[in-house]
Amino acid sequence: MRERIELRTAPHIVQGNSVERIMLHVVLALLPIAGFSVWQYGISAMALILTVTLTCVATERLMNHLMGTPNSLTDWSATITGLLLALTLPPAFPLWMAVIAAIAAIVLGKFLFGGIGNNIFNPALVGRAFVQAAFPVSISTWAPAFSSHRFSEFIPTTLTLPLMTPPDISVWAKQALDGFTGATPLARWKFENVLATPHDFLTGAVTASAGETSAILILLGGLYLAARRFLDWRIPVAVLLSAALTAWAFQLYNPVRFPDPLFVMLSGGLLIGAIFMATDMATSPVTPKGVWIYGALIGVVTVIIRYFGGLTEGVMYAILIGNALAPLIDQVTRPRVFGEIKVKKS
Amino acid sequence: MSEQQTIAPSPAPVTPSAAMIRTLGIVASICGALIVSAYQITLEPVAANKKIALERAVFKVIPGAASVTEYLATPGGIQLGSDTVPAGAVKFYAAYDQAGALKGIAAEGAAKGYADVVRVLYAYSPEKQAITGVGVISMRETPGIGDKIYTDKNYLKNFEALDVRLSADLKSLANAVKVVKHGTKKNPWEIDAIAGATVTSKAVGRGINESAQKLLPLLVPHVDNVSRPSGRQSP
Amino acid sequence: MSLPGQAVPSLMEEFLEGIWKQNPVFVMVLGMCPTLAVTVSAMNAVSMGLATAFVLVTSCLLISLVRNIVPSEVRIATYILIIATFVTVVDYAIQAISLAMYDALGAFIQLIVVNCIILGRAEAHAAKNPPMKATINAVGMGIGFTIGLFALGSVREIFGAGKLFGISLFGPDFQPWVVMVLPPGGFFVLGGWLLLFNWLKSRTPPAPAGVKVSEGHAHV
């Protein structure tokens, strides 16, 4: 009896697909999201995405040189890290801080572990976690979408001089968009008990990080990658399902205090995190059972951090925790070695 | 050490206990002498430092004060402060101006914040029956977020006249000091929390409430006893 | 140190050992508790370094003086007694000098007593060497530890507050990197310095084998 043994290591290679090709398609899937972000936030988002991506690429090249490793730009992974990182930052994030986030992502998140395929944590999230800890105020300063002058002027904080404190944008933001609150839907739910509607999320009329608002485009990108087998569809499904189930359970327990599962799935960075970050091949488990456990863990931790943590958003830390546990999950869910006989109790 | 002797012949040469005791005794006496002299030498400067630090903290929350006296409010009345605080007593500081008139009372409140205990010193005005100022003694909250409790002007405004009137039976506050969600302060005994630093701003309110609930019922009935600096009270 | 067959190091070498070759922070990676915890500013770091150096020098001197009369069975008890004494002295002295500094350093002053550099030096060096050598070596180690703490404290203060020794470097608009004054910042900066030191060491040609055996690695 011969069973087909699926040997899978990171990067995960499906026949005929090279790492380069998969990565290139991920970039393609991310481009519409980035485009939507630029349309929403104007030249500030454009500058943010370009700055972060270029810094990531330049840092990757520099680290290749310093560490004497072959040029790894052609595998597009630095580009993906840059794009993802930019899309998780607030559109008003000062560019000099974005440069630091990008350097932290590539150096701390990737090269300290030995470059592509060796990293334990998703590099983009390492970069974001670093600036979240370093600049807690700037990373929670949000700008209004669709302000009228978005293609002719920068958000005041974008061009802050390096090392300097960004100016207060609350006055500017109120002028740019009437009734702008400066709080994300998650923060508004947590502190003011105001729920955004699914319609707001689908049209991008919410306050969020640069790439979190376009639920439809994120889903389409994910579907495309999953259809071409460039990502493991089970991970996003497990993440979203477990987040929804956890939220549903909490809502059953106390419908007044806890929001509905749809809100939990659409708000914040859960979609982009589940589809583009949790699926990072180097940092997710490879065993079939492990993938489900990993995804479910991320979903549950996200909801718990959102509901009971000091922060309003928990996707980033949930995925980082999932990354940290991935090797352990792999170990305990290792499939039976071919030829191994399972001892049955008679 | 006596065990060493009861143990059957050990392979290593055994030092007699007397030698060990003697050595330890000699070293311990040298050390003891060192510690005692260090204590003696530093006693005065340390006391002076503590006094200066206390005065600085109290003068910050009670502007215009020129001297501070430490007291204990006990169920039996007001006593001069001592190093040990007996159970049931609360330490407080009375601040006087140049002429020796009571400017206000200061006391410490402490409650768990986001990272660690937040300790604050608040000023109480017996005249207004209100808290008139607050200062942070120590905290380890996140810089840039938790430190808003002493930089946020709107938050500090909460403590310019925070009502801590006693209830009719003088057993507790008429209205407990409460921290409410940002922007919903309605009553003079409520504190408007800082949006984004809720945990720390709540800790300040809780610390003040706990301390005031204990101190004021003991202090208010006898507040006349501290209206003059101690030692100059008329018998 | 002076095992048979080894060259007896000169006083200058004894002094320099702690500063470079056996630097407690960068080479031996000892005393990490205060190194990571109190180095949020250069002033705190230097104060902590000097307090530790004082305890190190005085206790090594005293231990070296009594080394011949202390039976080996009670030597650790004696060392701890002596170290604890000097820590108490330092504790009072810092309170007398500055209460603010005393509050900033917190429990880490008392914790000098369990700092492995001190017991390590007492056991590995002071107990085997005459007072002069022991003291010189301890001074070097103390300075090396202070330099290590200063290296961390200055970087963390510059990024975490835009200041050095409380003097503003970038003007009032500087955006502090909060992470630098939080515990992770301590690890990042320490990691950065260790990287730099190891890189520097890897560039210098290796010393002739067998000249010097490093010691004291076993302490936690």
Image (cartoon, helix red, strand yellow):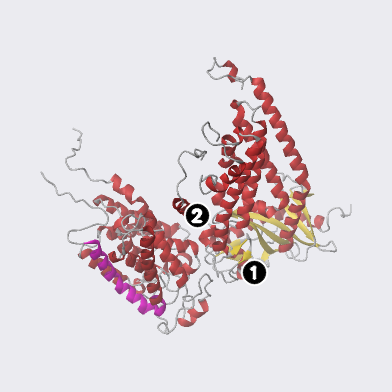
**Subunit under mark 2:** C
Vertical placement of residue C208 versus B128, above or below: above
Residue in front for this viewpoint, A323 or A102 = A102
Tell me the residue at 30%/63% (across/down): A275
The disc placed on residue C193 is 2
Magenta range: A18-45
Tell me the residue at 67%/24% (across/down): B21
Residue at the far left: name it: A1
Q: Amino acid at mark 2?
A: Trp
Where residue C152 appears, as percent x and y from the top left, is: 55, 55
Tell me the residue at 30%/74% (across/down): A32
Residue in front for this viewpoint, A310 or C21 = C21
Secondary structure character of the magenta stretch overall: helix
Where residue C112 appears, as percent x and y from the top left, is: 61, 43
Where residue C48 appears, as percent x and y from the top left, is: 62, 50
Q: Amino acid at mark 1?
A: Lys
Report which quarter residue A117 is drawn in: bottom left
Q: Is residue A153 magenta?
A: no
Query: Would you say C201 lies left or right of C73 here?
Result: left
SS under mark 1 = helix
Vertical placement of residue B61 versus A290, above or below: below
The Cα–Cα distance between marks 1 and 2, rounded to whole angstroms, is 45 Å
Asked if marks 1 and 2 touch (Cβ < 8 Å), the reply is no
